[in-house]
Amino acid sequence: MSLNKFSQKIGILGGGQLGKMLCQAGSKLGLNIAVLEKDLSYPAANVCRDFVCGDITNFDDVVSFGKDKDIITIEIENVSISALETLETLGKKVYPSPSALKIIRDKGLQKLFYEGYGLPTSAFSLFNDKNEILSAVENGKITIPFVQKSRTEGYDGKGVQIIRTKEKLALLLDGPGLVEDIVSIDKEIAVIVARNLSGEIKTYPAVEMHFHPTANLVEYLFCPSEISEDQSEKATTLAIMIAEKLNVVGLLAVEMFIDKGGQVLINEVAPRPHNSGHHTIEACITSQYEMHLRAILDLPLSSTELLRPAVMVNLLGAEGYSGPVQYEGIESCMSIDGVYPHLYGKKETKPYRKMGHVTIVDKSLPNAVNTARYIQNTLKVISYQ
């Protein structure tokens, strides 16, 4: 039976950096992995022996790609769900399931899901377009400040607007969205859950995330997080509950807030490897990428133990630079013990584009944080054109 599991054909929808690192983890196990993505400029093309060019949002492309696969998984949520449903009817194993993906991909349905199960999340309202929001503000149904999120296709800080003043209402996004109360945030954390088909569950230690003030995406994170044991237990319990209620097979990354009162609130989830788990490659017994593959193959889930404190720094394209990428200061950073750069292989940079990440491991978390600060100040993603 184990030999049959290892020989299964795995298809990954999406060829970005997460797809690349899934392929690298799969190579260690000799897995048969193929990737579907638009063209060979995507990071996974450099490491995947079976890279198929196609559109992951196109029904025909996804069905054609998946027909000869045993298992289909994703590295990004923006895929053709109808194609995944068709592949399920053809007997293919699809993880996450299309039914779970429908809920997760729509931030409005996510919030209704939490509300329906009595799970703690910030107060929210759903709107069809920005005119409805403007009317609700005028009528006093919602008050400034608030957070607006597009219901679909938002990622890496896109599809989010923080409205702090009346003047900022001009920045409202159009289309279906939700409005959330602004939480008085003390910390932002994430817990990654792994769950296989047999129901075995493992969780990674909570990480603490710090966000770029302009780009609204993770700038760096560290683990172990500086939260109480009680908060860690609550966050882990919530993450497991969501994974079980969604019947997720694979990984589920659960992002949460801890407010000034110490309450743990669910923000949103992603059913795949996640930015908040990059550090697991060097810092944990089992990386999130290997764990996702173990889970979808229904193999035993290995230990998630943190071997040593770690900080992960995202390498974002610097402001004012667009064009062929250059990494300024990287050699200086590589001369430091415990520094592990991961460059995704993207040829073109632009402001705030994720171009790579650096993981720093150290026996001392404060020392790792100091090194991370040095890297943030030294390693610049620029272009000479």
Image (cartoon, helix red, strand yellow):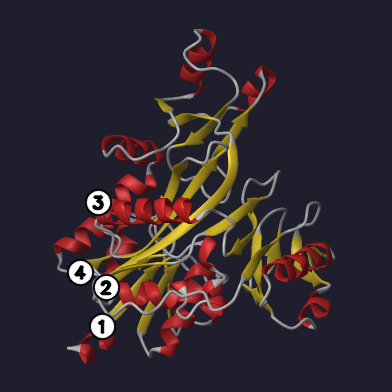
Hey, which residue is sitting farthest top in the picture? Answer: 139
Q: Which residue is mark 2?
A: 71
Q: Which residue is mark 3?
A: 245
Whole-Å distance between the Cαs marked 3 and 4?
Answer: 22 Å
What SS does tag 2 mark?
strand
- How far from the left and from the top, in percent, is residue 359? 64, 72
Whole-Å distance between the Cαs marked 1 and 3?
Answer: 27 Å
The answer to which of marks 4 and 2 sits earlier in the sequence is: 2
Front tag of 1 and 3: 3
Front tag of 3 and 4: 3
- How far from the left and from the top, in percent, is residue 2? 22, 89
In the image shown, does 85 or 195 lie closer to the viewer? 195
Residue 320 relative to residue 68: left or right = right
What SS does tag 4 mark?
loop
Whole-Å distance between the Cαs marked 4 and 1?
Answer: 11 Å
Q: Which residue is mark 4?
A: 92
The answer to which of marks 4 and 1 sits earlier in the sequence is: 1
- The dot on residue 8 is 1
The answer to which of marks 3 and 2 sits earlier in the sequence is: 2
- How far from the left and from the top, in percent, is residue 156? 57, 51
